Image (cartoon, rainbow, N blue to C red):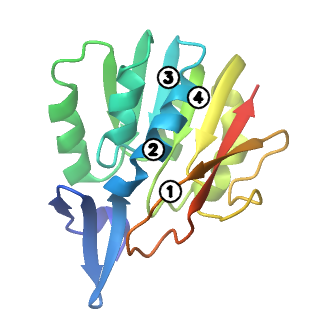
Amino acid sequence: MRYVDQTLVFESDRIYYTEEGVELQVMMSWEDSVMKASADYVCENGGDILEIGFGMGISAGYIQANSISSHTIIENHPQVIEKAKAWAIDKPNVTIIEGSWYDVKDSLSTYDGIFYDTWGDDDMDKFVDILPSLAKTSANASWWNNYTDTDDVLYTNGTVYEAISVSPVDNVYFESNTYYLPKKKF
């Protein structure tokens, strides 16, 4: 079953679903420091920010805490879309786009900061090729890095990494005490 068709469970410290008796975490609260560092980096230039994937809204909250002009969020899971809409209700600079980032890529603008953090994205391998067309000159981009070193899953030339100490709890997607935050400047 595709991720967008799964019924998600929302708890205070995680979003997950169960498939074949296994709990698959979509996002967890231990990621807070990573989300803050990611948001602060992509918002360094202020301006217009694109966030692909809303999850628990942790990074979205940190993006909003920065001095930015606009905040566009693309989310594809129906349950998470509803959470994102409720979160954004009192934030006039936020636009929620429903659906796959890949399906809407041609209707997007260019951005001063881009953050990509999705789960179960069938088009993840296409992101690095599309990224330059979404970035303004001098834009900062980052993405979730599952790898436990600087050889990350979405490696793109010119990426540097910031090592962040983390304390992940039991999960299926990241098991290291060091997270390598990708930082790409255009």
Residue 48: x and y, percent?
Answer: 50, 15
Cα separation, mark 1 vs mark 3, equals 25 Å
Do tag 1 and tag 2 residues touch (Cβ < 8 Å)? yes
Residue 24, image quadrant: bottom left
Looking at the image, is mark 4 or mark 2 earlier in the sequence?
2
Residue sitting at x 77%, y 60%? 151
Q: Nearer the viewer, residue 176 or 18?
A: 176
Residue 183, image quadrant: top right
Element on which disc 3 rests: strand
> Closer to the camera: disc 2 or disc 3?
2
Q: Which mark is residue 166?
A: 1
Looking at numbered disc 3 in the image, what kind of residue is underneath it?
Ile
Residue 51: x and y, percent?
Answer: 46, 34
- Residue ID for mark 4: 41
Q: Nearer the viewer, residue 157 or 30?
A: 30
Name the image quarter holding the C terminus.
Answer: top right
Do tag 1 and tag 4 residues touch (Cβ < 8 Å)? no
Question: How many C-alpha atoms fall within 10 Å of the one at disc 1: few (<14), some, or many (≥20)?
Answer: some
Q: Which mark is residue 33?
A: 2
Cα separation, mark 2 vs mark 3, equals 19 Å
Residue sitting at x 70%, y 46%? 128
Cα separation, mark 1 vs mark 4, equals 17 Å
Q: Which mark is residue 101?
A: none
Element on which disc 1 rests: loop
Cα separation, mark 4 vs mark 3, equals 11 Å
Element on which disc 4 rests: helix
Looking at the image, is mark 1 or mark 3 earlier in the sequence?
3
> Closer to the camera: disc 4 or disc 3?
4
